[in-house]
Amino acid sequence: MLDYTQYMTWRDESLQGTWHTPARLCAKVDGNGQYVPFAGATTVFRLDRRQTRALALMRDDLTQRLCGTGCLAAPLPESSFHLTLHDLANQENMAGRGVRGCRNSIHTVLRQAMDAVREIRHDSDGEVLCMQTDRIVNMVSLSLVCVMMPVSEKDRRLWDMWYERIQEVFPQEGPCLPHVTLQYYRPGMLDGTEIGHALRDAQPRSPIVLRLPVESLTAQFFSSMQTYRDWPLRVCFICDGGLNRSVMASAIANHMAAQRGLPLVACARSAEETGKGSVIPEEVIRTLAAHGIGWEAIQPFSVPLSSDPWTAFSRFVAVTAGAYARMLMAPVEKARWEAESGWLLGIPDPAEDGRYEEAYARLEKGVKALIARWTEEGLFSTDMDKTS
């Protein structure tokens, strides 16, 4: 860890005097401190609600200490908090290619990063990266960030290994500084002494450890510094036993995504533990096959929701009342599951009456509506003309 600590020595440099923010900050934040369209790609670790809340408290403390100075942009939403593993293409470093060339470059890099992340998740299955908060620092006069450090040598090796894999997709010069962005500056002249005093008083009194399962690693497209979208969108359909309705819904979603070329990966999970490992009924397989959905889109057995960390998924869809009740107790923001669940609730269990075709028709209608909604929200688009 010694070389890492030496690399981090700059974190203790004091802030003094005044300085003007770099011109490139204006590509992300306007003069009123509002975020403007800025497109790009990145690879990040999703954070759970407990972790984002702890970081939000740091952000709020900084905001209060610098209240009235006019140096900060609008607060970043908690939904934008993430630990950056490796930045990728964006409209700044791809500016010389024009709007269309930049968009195409971002899209291409996203696809490559998506494949790299899938390989990392597969090859490092079960690994958990532990990072701890170090200090809040001024990051190249653009933002205030919480710098993170590996807890152990093992964590350092994991970080380096995963970082180097993404380096193959989009090489960058110099080492990566693990960090979570808490707040951007407002463009203009800043008082470094005032900011320095606030940073001194706002430093974490004790380290906060973030446990980051490899499943929480994802590629993302961002349309501004407060709007990030997972790439692919990882959707978890949940029913009571994970054998019928959620399996059919996830298979339908995967089939539609493959047909339309959408960055979407769906899986089925059970809200209950009792059916763990049970084989999917033949009736489900025959019903899906009758509609042209083959084995490659179908989950072969029941998997409980507890098998994965909550941060493994972008969205959740409760397909039954029992699953909905389970999600009410989950440490997941309601925005990530409540609205989506309304499209598929109330479909009877086909295992009870054998009406698999009826269940399929209703599930297909609901999944189509969900995909249409996500498409309208721009979750599958890298069109820079529509960033907001």
Image (cartoon, rainbow, N blue to C red):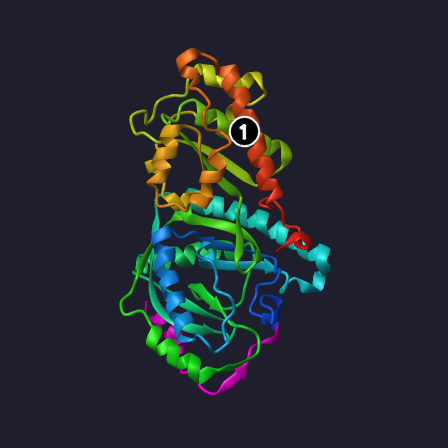
Q: Is residue 352 left or right of residue 221?
A: left
- Where residue 228 appears, x then y in whole percent? 53, 53
Name the residue: 46% across, 77% down. Answer: 68
Residue 177 appears anywhere in the view: yes
For this view, does 35 lie left or right of residue 322? right
Q: Nearer the viewer, residue 43 or 225?
A: 225
The residue positioned 41% from the left and 59% from the top of the image is: 160
Residue highlighted by disc 1: 366
- Quadrant of the image occupied by residue 2: bottom left
Q: Is residue 10 magenta?
A: yes
Q: Amino acid at mark 1?
A: Gly
Residue 50 placement, left or right of 42: left
User: Residue 192 in the image: x percent, y percent?
Assistant: 46, 82
Residue 124 shows up from this direction: no
Front-most of 154 and 353?
Answer: 353
Quadrant (top left, top right, bottom left, bottom right) of the N terminus: bottom left
Instruction: Identify the image quadrant of the C terminus.
Output: bottom right
Q: Which residues are magenta?
A: 1-23
Residue 228 sits above or below residue 199 on the image: above
